[in-house]
Amino acid sequence: MTLNLLFDKILNMNYQAHDRFSISSEVLSQEVNGETVLLDLEGECYFGLNEVGTRVWQLLQCESSVGEALDTLSGEYDVSRAQLESDVGALLGKLTEAGLVTLAS
């Protein structure tokens, strides 16, 4: 399977509300001015998250389920649920593809 097909498969996953993600033990994170820098120690790569991505990362650190995270974000941001689900799903797909998180449930 090519990387692009794998990436498309991850981005098109339909996460269940009860699904939880685990953060890799090989990832260090540091919040700076409302954004987060992630360092993948294994791949020696840096990743940056904007304010909303940072909030998703915080919820992952609290071991929130996908549904709990979406409910929290819905109350904090003025965005449609459909758009939120799409954006969070895309972010989770990218984090999974990069090996920063894994589906725990």
Image: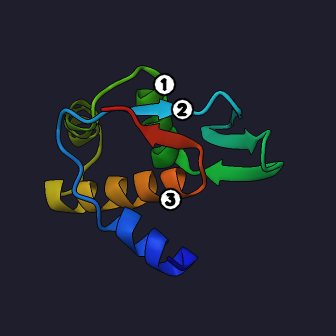
| Dot 2 amino acid type | Ile
The image position of residue 75, as x and y in percent, is 21, 36
Residue matched to label 3 = 94
Judge from the rendering whether residue 44 lies leftward or rightward of residue 101; answer left or right.
Answer: right
Q: Nearer the viewer, residue 54 or 10?
A: 10
* Disc nearest the viewer among 2 and 1: 2
Residue matched to label 1 = 61
Q: How is the image coloured?
A: rainbow
Q: Are marks 2 and 3 in contact (CB under 8 Å)?
A: no
Q: Residue at x 30, y 67 (%)?
A: 12
Q: Quadrant of the C terminus?
A: top left
**Mark 3 or mark 1: whose residue is earlier in sequence:** 1
Q: Nearer the viewer, residue 94 or 69?
A: 94
Label 2 to label 1: alpha-carbon separation: 7 Å
Residue 31 lies, with reference to residue 77, above or below; the image says: above
The image position of residue 5, as x and y in percent, is 45, 78
Q: Nearer the viewer, residue 40 or 58?
A: 40
| Dot 1 amino acid type | Gln
Q: Are marks 2 and 1 in contact (CB under 8 Å)?
A: yes
**Mark 2 or mark 1: whose residue is earlier in sequence:** 2
Q: Residue at x 60, y 55 (%)?
A: 98
Residue 3 visible (yes or no): yes
Residue 23's disc number: 2
Asked which secondary structure carries label 3, the reply is: helix
When asked about the image quadrant of residue 93, the answer is bottom left
The image position of residue 39, as x and y in percent, is 75, 41
Asked which secondary structure carries label 2, the reply is: strand
> Local crowd at mark 2 within 10 Å, few (<14), some, or many (≥20)?
some
| Dot 3 amino acid type | Lys
> Local crowd at mark 1 within 10 Å, few (<14), some, or many (≥20)?
few
